[in-house]
Image: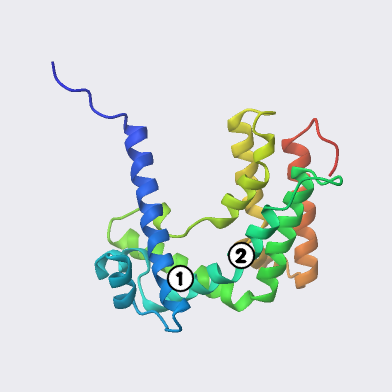
């Protein structure tokens, strides 16, 4: 009797996770070099991560893209880890904590707008390079921090609603935070930075009310 092939969805999920781990390993190697007081090059990162330069270039098509990603990750990871680790007490709910996270990220983007616009350009360049090479894998373009933070913040609600509904809410909330959302509010809507942050807060609040109809306004 022949062996049964692996479930295609399981196999695809395994490939996605592997690519995420590879990308994370590249960034971790670059940060280790930076922590030693050096400016990491692609060659150094490849050696530190025990990968080929070709692999590193697949995730970061040029040296500047790697440095921009490193700048973004170093700037926000520690601060948000502390915020997300805060206890839910004194009237703090997952919804109110989520609004804090979104406000904090959008304020950080406002204070580092040039960096985030540069990062967006590199993310697009990476996607286009993959498209030209016939590699249409969205998961190697970027880490997706905002989804990870939103998901972690709303984790206490997982037993109160269907997984599909929570996933849809998490995905929708990604639209109102981060560099792309801030750029739309600034460029398309013509808002000042403080106005953009306030509108994003309002939109996140509206999404929470719509996605959690049994919950009153946070």
Q: Residue at x 72, y 50 (%)?
A: 98
Which percent across, then down, holds residue 159? Answer: 66, 29
Which percent across, then down, holds residue 114? Answer: 60, 78
Which percent across, then down, holds residue 72? Answer: 55, 70
Asked if residue 47 is positioned above or below residue 146 in the image, the reply reads below
Residue 44 visible in the picture: yes
Compute the Cα span from label 2 to label 1. Answer: 23 Å
Residue at disc 2, secondary structure: helix
Residue position marked by numbered label 2 in the rendering: 78
The quadrant of the rendering that contains the C terminus is: top right
The quadrant of the rendering that contains the N terminus is: top left
Asked if residue 103 is positioned above or below residue 30 in the image, the reply reads above
Residue at disc 1, secondary structure: helix
Residue 137 visible in the picture: no
Q: Is residue 57 left or right of residue 151?
A: left
Residue position marked by numbered label 1 in the rendering: 122
Asked if residue 165 is positioned above or below residue 120 in the image, the reply reads above
Give the quarter of the image for residue 184: bottom right
Q: Residue at x 32, y 37 (%)?
A: 11
Q: Is residue 168 left or right of residue 13?
A: right
Color scheme of the displayed model: rainbow
**2 or 1: tag closer to the N-terminus:** 2
Q: Which residue extends farthest front?
A: 36
Q: Which residue extends farthest top?
A: 1
Q: Residue at x 60, y 55 (%)?
A: 146
Mark drawn on residue 6: none
Q: Which residue extends farthest bottom?
A: 38
Badge 1 density bin: few <14, some 14–19, many ≥20, Cα 10 Å: many
Q: Nearer the viewer, residue 31 or 64?
A: 31
Q: Nearer the viewer, mark 2 or mark 1?
A: 2
């Amino acid at each position: 009797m022949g062996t049964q092939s692996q479930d295609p969805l399981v196999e695809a999920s395994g490939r996605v996770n592997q690519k995420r781990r590879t990308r994370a390993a590249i960034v971790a190697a670059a940060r280790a070099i930076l922590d030693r007081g050096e400016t990491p090059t692609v060659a150094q990162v490849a050696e530190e991560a025990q990968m080929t330069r070709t692999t590193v270039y697949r995730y970061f098509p040029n040296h500047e893209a790697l440095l921009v990603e490193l700048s973004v990750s170093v700037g926000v990871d520690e601060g948000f880890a502390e915020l997300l680790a805060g206890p839910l007490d004194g009237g703090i709910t997952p919804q109110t904590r989520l609004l804090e996270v979104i406000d904090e990220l959008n304020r950080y983007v406002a204070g580092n707008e040039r960096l985030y616009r540069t990062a967006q350009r590199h993310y697009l360049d990476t996607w286009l390079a993959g498209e030209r090479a016939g590699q249409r894998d969205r998961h190697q373009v970027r880490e997706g921090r905002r989804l990870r933070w939103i998901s972690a913040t709303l984790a206490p609600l997982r037993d109160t609603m269907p997984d599909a509904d929570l996933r849809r809410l998490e995905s929708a909330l990604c639209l109102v935070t981060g560099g792309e959302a801030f750029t739309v509010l600034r460029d398309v809507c013509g808002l000042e930075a403080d106005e953009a942050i306030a509108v994003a807060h309002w939109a996140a609040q509206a999404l929470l009310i719509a996605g959690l109809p049994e919950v009153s306004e946070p």
